[in-house]
Amino acid sequence: MDDHDDSPETSPTLEERMEQAEREARRASRQSREQTPTETERSLTPHEREAVSDNGRLSALTVYAIILREGEEELHRPKTSLWWSGVAAGIGISASVLGLGIFRAGLGPDFPYLWLVGSLGYTVGFVLVILCRMQLFTENTITVVLPLLANPDRGRLYSTLRLWGLVFAANMVGTFLTAAITIHGGILSDDIMLAVLDVSRHVAALSPSTSLLHGIPAGFFIAALVWMLPSSKGSEVIVIVLFTWLIAAGGFTHVVAGSNEIFCLVMNGELGIVTAFTHHIFPVLVGNIIGGTGLFAMLAYGQISQEM
């Protein structure tokens, strides 16, 4: 048998080719700086110059490779793992609605800039879900889409749609269960309960078209957040808090967190379950997909497609 058999099993994957290209680019960059060092670099030892190079910002291609790897891993996870991780994410993201209610109840309706300060409570659930590595649908509008853009084929499209459907359904189950506990569990004080319902009514007051439009920036910001995390270098919490606060303060709509607000109204008898999906949840879902996949993921892929 030929020792150099170029079979599909031994050929490098797209991710491996990108990582190799990135290593070669960094090596060439270091060699270039060593050959023509700047005045500042002349005062550094070779070891210090190496440290400067290694601690530079991640390139867009490197970030893409990291997220691509995560997307490939998610596409190959067992269905049971995806399901329970998605349910956990739905339960965890509901902490954002609870945080909003606690802030609003604690600060009182007459507090100056109530909406801006109270929106900090919205960030709690996202910090919990993202750092715990739970399956949140809006993160998957970029992570599992990048592998599809890199190698578009029918099988990968099916895997992406399967993961989307499974994770979205699991997220909805999680937020529905949490809404039931919130309304009927007797675990919240009257002030916090009233604040949660007030926040939920504010979301339900949006028309379907407005919900869709407000979902586009939210989807874009979540996808951007996922893109930034590999470069955060210990500042992940700050990045998550900043951009999820922006979603809440700007009045934008997130399909998973927003579904908990809508389900709270369903459980309180103020909204029908069919109306909840057709007028609120599905429009926001479309908006988040447009913002996360249609805008950010496509733009992110476009900026590195030629480098690949």
Image: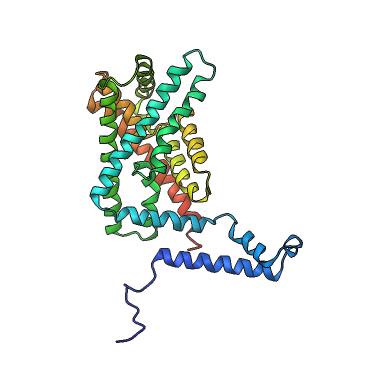
Foreground of the two, 6 or 45: 45
Residue 163, visible in the rendered structure: yes
Q: Is residue 282 above or below residue 166?
A: above
Residue 278, visible in the rendered structure: no
Foreground of the two, 123 or 208: 123
Q: Is residue 146 above or below residue 210?
A: below
Q: How is the image coloured?
A: rainbow
Q: Quadrant location of residue 73?
A: bottom left
130 with respect to 117 (left or right): left
51 with respect to 302 (left or right): right
Which residue is situated farthest in the top direction here? Answer: 110
| Rendering coords of residue 122 (x, y %) | 43, 30
Q: Which quarter of the figure is the N terminus placed in?
A: bottom left
| Rendering coords of residue 127 (x, y %) | 43, 38
293 with respect to 246 (left or right): left
Q: What residue lies at 47% left-to-right and 27% top-to-bottom?
A: 119
